[in-house]
């Protein structure tokens, strides 16, 4: 079971869109994962045990796990590339 | 007509699920998915009403006690954007405001008045809120629609003007941020930045710290903000220790639960959001357009994070210092960075300048939020979000655009309108000039 943390500024708008699309993507590819949402400010304390962080905000900090910029889930630009990156980390 | 009135009388927790279900069917989402979306949005409303109840029933009386004991005015709790947005969505104007805001965008794109393609349906709640406030104040549906149109057109223009900042400073190419609390406050920051540039000595001060997050990062976490505020206010209210501790944990719970329940409203809106995005994407894409997105994208930037941490205590201090202020900042504190996020870009990451312009922005915000308590409470009561007490919000209840439009339709505060309106209009014109000179 993989753990994915999806973060945005307020844990409501953009991260919900991204999290729903990531859940669908992982289901399509038969990856068993727990996808949860949080605010960017909570990443530091929630990161332990996580395999991947996807943020819609640009994050400069290093959390010790792979961070993928998930803006494509919102804007639709470069979506295939982002999906591939996520699958590479989790497979 | 009778059927329509019957449905309206059912209240937002039933009406909106019905509307979303029907819209889902119209947008060819299938019965199962539409049903799920509809019920999910209802779940969101039930959830947020519970959480706002927890907030106003517990923190409200404590704040009142504290206010009475220390002669502090802070007795009206700020429910924040997680509390204010459901009020906008559950206003009778919401389902008209969404298509209106999209239509304004499309018309402006077709007539080349903006380059911003706003695909972010969630943040239409800001424009909807302006309409809902005008509706609550005047009872006139058409005034409310005019408010939504003016607010929408204005923020799409702001999106254009600040797109260079978003692209260059934040490195988000092709993105504009046409709404939310970060962008409306940015014209103030443009003026303050220009003023600081003229002051010898002060103009050289540049603080740019990434250490703040390392040292104080935990302070910015919602659970900590909630617990600390709950404990401090319980203590100041003269509660016994057992009640103080309970209030602390309850407020930590409010901070965590607010986005968790509001998220369901967003999930329910997804079919509409996806359909709107598909339509806009098909017609308007390519180099000459910006994709309009949520200011949440800026909140990961380390200087914005640092400013957010500074502004949690600073906003509380400002709230205490403003004469006659009743609003106790709470719900917006965990995301206070929204207000100063664009300012950080305008000041090119200089925290010293961000603190100065941010302090000005928060003062104006709290001043407005305080004048809006009456009409905000009326909106919250009309939509069934609260049954007693008073509410306020910094985001969007403290925004100049909402305040100015509301006052134009129902004049209650002439002098503040002239002062805030004067400064704001000047800042907007100045911003436009700076944009034309390519200085932002």
Image (cartoon, rainbow, N blue to C red):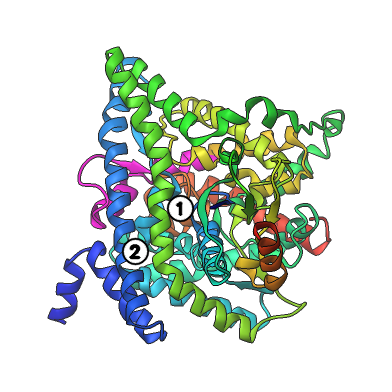
Percent x, y of residue B3: 15, 80
Query: Quarter of the image containing the C terminus of chain B?
Result: bottom right
Whether residue B78 is visible here, answered yes or no, is yes
Q: Is residue A42 magenta?
A: no
User: In this rendering, is residue B40 above or below B101?
Assistant: above
How far apart are the two marked residues, 2 and 1, measured between alpha carbons? Answer: 28 Å
Q: How many marks?
A: 2
**Residue marked by disc 1:** B403
Return the x and y of residue B94 as percentages of the image width and height. Answer: 37, 68
The one nearer the camera, B306 or B432, is B306
Q: Quadrant of the N terminus of chain B?
A: bottom left
B174 lies left or right of B425: right
Circle 2 residues within 10 Å: few <14, some 14–19, many ≥20: many
Residue corresponding to mark 2: B41
Tags 2 and 1 on a common chain: yes
Q: Which residues are magenta?
A: B364-392
Q: Position of residue B423 (x, y in %)?
A: 61, 48
């Amino acid at each position: 079971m993989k753990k994915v943390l999806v973060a945005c500024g307020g844990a409501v708008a953009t991260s919900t869109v991204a999290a729903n699309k990531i859940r669908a993507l992982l289901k399509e590819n038969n990856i068993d994962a727990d996808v949860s949402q949080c605010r960017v400010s909570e990443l530091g304390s929630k990161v332990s045990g996580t395999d991947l962080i996807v943020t819609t905000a640009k994050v400069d900090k290093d959390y010790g796990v792979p961070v993928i910029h998930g803006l494509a889930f919102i804007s639709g630009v470069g979506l295939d590339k982002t999906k591939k990156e996520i699958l590479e980390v989790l497979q | 007509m009778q059927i329509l009135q019957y449905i309206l009388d059912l209240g937002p927790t039933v009406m909106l699920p019905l509307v979303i279900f029907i819209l889902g069917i119209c947008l060819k989402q299938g019965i199962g998915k539409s049903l799920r979306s509809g019920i999910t949005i209802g779940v969101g409303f039930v959830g947020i009403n519970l959480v706002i109840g927890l907030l106003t029933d517990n923190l409200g009386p404590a704040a009142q006690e504290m206010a009475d004991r220390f002669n502090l005015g802070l007795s009206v709790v700020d429910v924040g954007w997680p509390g204010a947005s459901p009020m906008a969505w559950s206003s009778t104007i919401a389902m008209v405001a969404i298509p209106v805001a999209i239509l304004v965008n499309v018309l402006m794109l077709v007539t080349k008045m903006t380059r911003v393609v706003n695909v972010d349906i969630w943040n239409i709640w800001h424009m909807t809120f302006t309409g809902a406030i005008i509706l609550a104040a005047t009872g006139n549906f058409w005034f409310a629609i005019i408010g939504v149109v003016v607010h929408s057109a204005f923020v799409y223009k702001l999106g254009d003007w600040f797109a260079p900042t978003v692209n260059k400073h934040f490195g988000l190419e092709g993105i504009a941020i046409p709404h939310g609390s970060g962008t409306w406050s940015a014209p103030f920051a443009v003026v303050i930045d220009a003023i600081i540039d003229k002051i010898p000595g002060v103009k050289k001060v540049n603080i740019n710290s990434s250490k703040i997050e390392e040292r104080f990062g935990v302070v910015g976490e919602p659970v900590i903000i909630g617990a600390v505020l709950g404990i401090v206010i319980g203590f100041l209210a003269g509660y016994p220790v057992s009640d103080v501790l309970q209030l602390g944990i309850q407020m930590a719970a409010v901070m965590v639960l607010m986005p968790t329940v509001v998220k369901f409203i967003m999930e329910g809106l997804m079919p509409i959001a996806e359909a709107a995005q598909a339509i806009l994407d098909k017609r308007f894409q390519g180099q000459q357009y910006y994709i309009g997105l949520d200011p949440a994208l800026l909140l990961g930037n380390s200087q914005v994070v640092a400013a957010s941490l500074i502004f949690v205590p600073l906003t509380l201090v400002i709230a205490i210092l403003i004469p006659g202020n009743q609003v106790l900042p709470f719900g917006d504190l965990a995301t206070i960075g929204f207000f100063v996020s664009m300012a950080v870009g305008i000041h090119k990451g200089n925290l010293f300048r961000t603190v100065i312009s941010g302090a000005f922005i928060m003062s104006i915000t709290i001043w407005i939020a305080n004048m809006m308590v009456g009409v905000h409470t009326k909106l919250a009561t009309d939509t069934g979000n609260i049954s007693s007490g008073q509410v306020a919000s910094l985001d969007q209840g403290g925004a100049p655009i909402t305040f100015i439009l509301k006052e134009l339709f129902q004049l209650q505060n002439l002098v503040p309108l002239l002062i805030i309106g004067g400064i704001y209009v000047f800042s907007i014109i100045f911003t436009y000039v700076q944009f034309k000179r390519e200085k932002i």
